Amino acid sequence: MRMKQLLALLLLAALPLGVQASGPTVLVLKATAYTSSPRETDATPYVTATGARTRFGIIAVSRDLLPTDLPYGSKVKIEDLGNWRNGAGKGRFDPMLKNVVFVVEDTMNKRKRQQIDIWMPDRSLALRWGVRRVRLTVLQRGR
């Protein structure tokens, strides 16, 4: 019995301070969708803030999330939690999101906070998306 206690104390002493076991970071955020339309972007609608070419799998994040939670290059999985206001249609877009690892490559207008914007290939799909609540699971923080 004493040997097990001594071994446990030695193992604990070997760990650096502040090390904790924890799971992946999960964020619940408002999510909208955007396309490469010049009216929704800037003068270079097919180029993101990092210089990447737009494609499905690219997300823009609000600037308050960029320095701490979701810096450029972060990889996330997205789950549809339904309409932003009432949760209606929960999971409706999960088949589209399920096998995609999204990458933070763009930023949103500075007036947006606690929000992401998912790039969509066409306006009709972006409009069907509307404003939704999503669960982001961070797979990799930054590059």
Image (tube, helix red, strand yellow):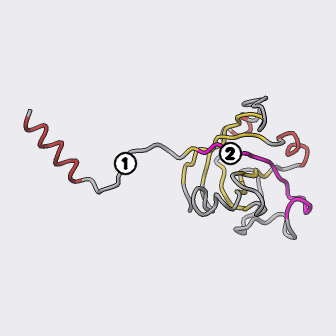
Q: Which residues are magenta?
A: 27-41
Does the magenta run of residues contain 28?
yes
Does the magenta run of residues contain 13?
no
Q: Between residues 105 and 121, which one lies in front from this camera angle?
A: 105
- Rendered-image quadrant of the N terminus: top left
Which residue: 37% across, 48% down? Answer: 20
Q: Position of residue 118 (x, y in %)?
A: 76, 50
Which residue: 75% across, 34% down? Answer: 82
Dot 2: element:
strand
Dot 1: element:
loop
Q: Is residue 95 above or below residue 61?
A: above
Q: Are marks 1 and 2 in contact (CB under 8 Å)?
A: no
Label 2, residues with CA under 10 Å away: few <14, some 14-19, many ≥20: some
Q: Position of residue 113 (x, y in %)?
A: 72, 55
User: Which residue type does callout 2 highlight?
Assistant: Leu
- Rendered-image quadrant of the C terminus: bottom right
Give the Cα distance between marks 1 and 2.
Answer: 25 Å
Residue corresponding to mark 1? 20
Q: Position of residue 134 (x, y in %)?
A: 69, 41
User: Which residue type does callout 1 highlight?
Assistant: Gln
Q: Position of residue 18 (x, y in %)?
A: 34, 54
**Tag on residue 29?**
2
Image check: 52 left or right of 75? right
Q: Quadrant of residue 51?
A: bottom right
Which residue: 61% across, 48% down? Answer: 76
